[in-house]
Amino acid sequence: MKTNWYKEAVVYQVYPFSFMDSDNDGMGDIPGIISKLDYIKDLGATAIWFSPLYVSPCRDYGYDVADYKAIDPKFGTMEDFDRLMEECRKRGLRVIMDMVLNHTSDQHPWFREALKDKNSPYRDYYIIRKGRWAGRKKNKLIPPTNWTSSFTGSAWQRIDGTDEFYLHLFAPEQPDLNWENPAVRDEIIDILKFWLDKGVSGFRFDVFNMYSKVYPLRDDRSPVRFQKGTPYYVDGPRMHEFLKEMNDRALSLYDSYTVGESYIPDPEHASRYISEESGELDTIFDFEHLNADNNLKFMPKPFDLRVFKKGLIEPQLRHHGRGWNTLVLENHDNPRSVSRFGINTKKYRYEAATFLALVTFMGWGTPFIYQGEEIGMTNSDFRSMSQLKDPVSHFVYDMMTGQLHIPGKAAFAMIRRGARDHARTPMQWDGSVNAGFNTGAEPWQCINSNYRDINAEKDLASEKSVYRFYQKLLEIKKTDKTAIYGETIEYDPDNRKIIMYSRTYEGRRLLIAGNFSGKKTECIIPDDFALTELNIKLTNYDRNRVERVMELEPYEAILFEEM
């Protein structure tokens, strides 16, 4: 029977490549993860989301799957995974798997069969169309539409020796699946049941709202230069039907939880995806607050707290009572949070890390913690493009220097600021060789040079421990019914330095207030709170007195409890 266990959960994301390398081959693995499960449990997590562990040629580091039912040998064996499941069960940790179902790897047997034989039934597992003849003499073969990929130029790749192209909304090595084909959906249901039968408790669906395309396929005539085609593949006409089918045929038959990574979702669709009446998904990620200091990730702009607050608070107001929400600061696709939002990381790293945690995770929704976030890991000091492994970094760099004619040095500075690579450097466990990630073999991705100063061992021994603060915060989040279920009310949304909101549940209230700046800032407690009834439940500074007008220290955050 399906329950709502996820509403009182705390999820910890593990990026397997970079978590812990047990066999010293430079790459993280399942035995390494097992060795650190107590660390995750002690933090306060109740579930672990694993980025893909499946067989993959790793063009996009696991998000190009070649076999959905097999563990990649670089991470271990299926027996290792079964042991991981058992060790998680012993600790009360649920397992959430990443599901990449918009596309496969071009090395997947389905795709290889599709290319081998034009009459193969697998041909219709993908979106293959004839090209168009263009030019004055109609002698130039161009793609079926003008859609562009998120990772390259055209979203179409020509099939060698033919006049046909296949669609790939990401890298050319990631051909899109044809969800219109019932056989594809049957395969997907089978995959989901395979893992659910192994005891997996849920799934994170990668770019899920791109499954349904608008047919017939056509050019995007809008004036936008990049990301052409989005009106025809985001929140498509059959999205809700496809999600409900997955839920009816597989997900609802187990005590499962689902979270969707959506690609620029329409608010109306977003609400419907997670509506309890719709029977589609349990939650989606909302990332609008993470756009408060950038345009399209690599284009920086001055941090605007009002944008951050709107992105964080609005989903809580919009979805409350209708579905469920998620709370997130970091993941494998975003730079480190303490290195963003105008924060002086060298001066205020502890304060900012704990501030961000409190004002974000005390909201309404399930917290998602990304590995290293709980010790305040920062962005790396990459020196050149050769240190960046992410194909997106290289695609955007080539686009900047080629199409936009931005000098290489300036382009690299922009890429370095927003690169996904920052989140993918090895976990910093201690001050030994390679930050304790392994015993000396060269890691697949370079170690952050500050690992001797910032690592789990040193943080746990510090009087200002980010990890210890997270423990206190997450304990409240898991056990306090107001912190879990309370309705959110925001105060002073236009304030450029203060973030403040309350949570109300069955007549009890919590008040969250914080100074999102590097200077002392005045904060006024709302009049509807009696000072004599307010108590400081948690703060990242040494403060115990409540006043109507309080001067908050840089990145000071306070959780007040109404007595």
Image (spheres, grey):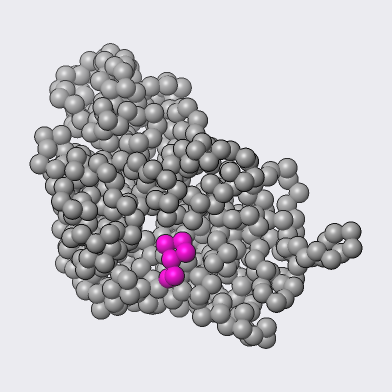
Quadrant assignment, res 521: top left
Return the residue nearer the eye: 272 or 438: 438
Q: In this view, does 345 lie above or below 374?
A: above
Q: Where is residue 244 in the image (x, y as percent from the top left)?
A: 52, 65
Q: Which residue is drawn at 51% across and 51% down?
A: 394
The one nearer the camera, 206 or 440, is: 440
- Image point (48%, 41%), residue name: 412
Q: Does the image show residue 6?
A: no
The span picked out in magenta is 56-61
Q: Nearer the viewer, residue 32 or 374?
A: 32
Q: Does the magenta stretch include residue 58?
A: yes
Principal secondary structure, stretch drawn in magenta: loop
Side of 469 where 161 appears, left or right: right
Tell which of 202 and 3 is nearer to you. 202
- For the image shown, how many numbered marks are present on the structure? 0
Q: Which residue is drawn at 45% across and 54% down?
A: 390
* 304 vs 191: above or below: above
Residue 463 is a magenta residue: no
On the question of residue 554 being in view, the answer is: yes
Where, quadrant-wise, is the C terminus in this rendering? top left
Residue 282 percent coordinates (x, y):
42, 56
Residue at (59, 59) in percent of width and height: 169
Q: Can you say which quadrant of the picture contains the N terminus?
A: bottom left
Q: Position of residue 205 (x, y in %)?
A: 45, 61
Quarter of the image holding residue 485? Answer: top left
- Asked if 448 appears above or below 63 in the picture, the reply is above
